[in-house]
Amino acid sequence: MTETEFIKFYKEKNGVKNKEEAKEKIDNFWKALLKATAEDKKVVFKNWGVFEEKDVKSRKIVIPIQYKEAYTKPKKVLKFRVGKGLIKLVNERSENSE
């Protein structure tokens, strides 16, 4: 599902007037989530999952065109670990659709 398809889906399911308003609501959710993870390093949605900020260490890579070795920069990434409730919900829906 592309971002545009998701915005249309969100708009239809929640009775939002237009696509711009739906996109704004989705963007506000992500901004709040990113701000919360920046402050607390972890956001837990009960039975759904956990968003965590993790550190990724520098690693060695090979650039094939130049035959050079290089190192990536260490960085922080946002990881999502799925919860049991979300797994159960997805499995129930996939069984019902078949």
Image: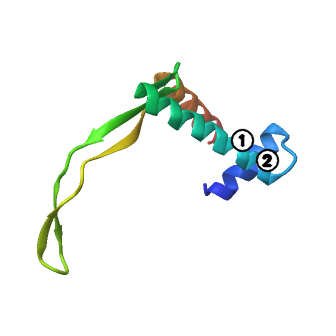
Toward the viewer: 66 or 1? Answer: 66
Residue occupying the point 38% across, 35% down: 53
- Residue 41 lies, with reference to residue 68, above or below; the image says above
Total numbered badges shown on the rendered structure:
2
Looking at the rendered structure, the kind of residue marked 2 is Glu
Q: Is residue 6 left or right of 51 when viewed as pictured?
A: right
Looking at the rendered structure, the kind of residue marked 1 is Lys
**Residue 96 occupies which quadrant of the picture?**
top right
Toward the viewer: 9 or 58? Answer: 58
Q: Residues within 10 Å of mark 2 (few under 14, many from 20)?
A: few
In this rendering, does residue 82 appear at all?
Answer: no
Toward the viewer: 82 or 24? Answer: 24
Instruction: Find residue 94 and report its horizontal and vertical position in percent.
Output: 58, 38
Residue 66 is marked as none
Q: Is residue 41 left or right of 48 when viewed as pictured?
A: left
Q: Secondary structure at mark 1?
A: helix
Residue 25 is marked as 1
Residue occupying the point 63% across, 37% down: 29
